[in-house]
Amino acid sequence: METRFYDDNLLEEPIPRSIFLAGPTARARRTPWRAEAIAQLEALRFDGTVVIPEFRDGTFEELAPRVFGSAPSLVPGMRAVSHNILRWETTGIEQCAVVLFWMPFQIKAEEDPASLPGFTTRAEVSRELARNPSRIVLGMPPGALSGGHIRFHAHHAGVPISLTLEETVRAALALATPAGFEPAT
């Protein structure tokens, strides 16, 4: 399995057999749900590419200004770092074969890695539901904070919502792999 992180340059071309891990990001070195999704994909022997909107090593606070701060923002009133991160993430979402959205929306203490309100994720899900719902896989556990809007629009777009990360990963794997691929069980 190949992985691409913020540290890697993404080109404006399709990434075959790829899964973008979209969803809220913790301020930890690796968001726990993403680490679990990567481990599940490895255990299922996914041999495509996984695009991860986090840094390979290091923290967001230390690396974001270095990696994303040099090119200017093209959007009036938007900081360069924010603009360039959103450009990278949008490129990844648009170029991947499948976009896996895991949405465990919760608000906890600021330093708690389980605090994942998903403000950006909510906008990304809405955009993809309107743009191309056939290539997204949605997962949201019961009790996720304020998920009604997404559930409503997903239902109307014919996109099911898995209740566990494992179900969500398996659905993304099925969509990203060619017919006849047998994942490990």
Image (cartoon, helix red, strand yellow):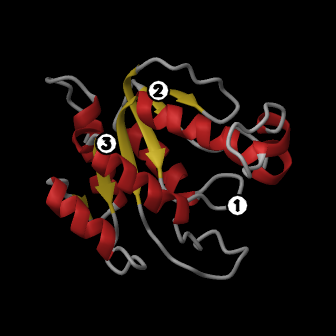
Q: Who's the residue at 14% across and 23% down the image?
A: 180
The quadrant of the rendering that contains the C terminus is top left
**Disc 3 target residue:** 131
Q: Helix, strand or loop at disc 1?
A: loop
Please state if 38 lies on the left or on the right of 4 as rendered: left
Q: Counting residues from the N terminus, which is met first, the one under dot 3 or under dot 2?
A: 2
The kind of residue tagged 3 is Arg
Q: Position of residue 108 (x, y in %)?
A: 61, 82
86 horizontally vs 168: left or right: right
Identify which residue, 32 or 85, lies in the foreground. 85
Report helix, strand or loop for mark 3: helix
Question: Mark 2: which amino acid?
Answer: Met
- Marks 1/3 in contact by CB < 8 Å: the verdict is no
The residue under label 1 is: 27
Label 2 crowd (10 A; few <14 / some 14-19 / many >=20): few
On the image, the x and y values in percent for residue 184 come to 27, 36
**Of the pair 45 and 155, the residue shown nearer to us:** 155
> Which numbered disc, 1 or 3, marks the residue that appears first in the sequence?
1
Q: Nearer the viewer, residue 98 or 85?
A: 85
Say which residue label 2 marks. Answer: 1
Of marks 3 and 2, the one in the foreground: 3
Residue 39 in the image, given as x and y percentages of width and height: 47, 45
Q: Compared with residue 26, is residue 97 higher up or lower down, i.e. above or below?
A: above
Q: Residue 140, how many percent across, how many down? A: 34, 66
Tell me if mark 1 has few (under 14), some (14-19) or many (20+) residues whose alpha carbon lies within 10 angstroms of its own: some
Instruction: State the residue at coordinates (61%, 43%).
Output: 86
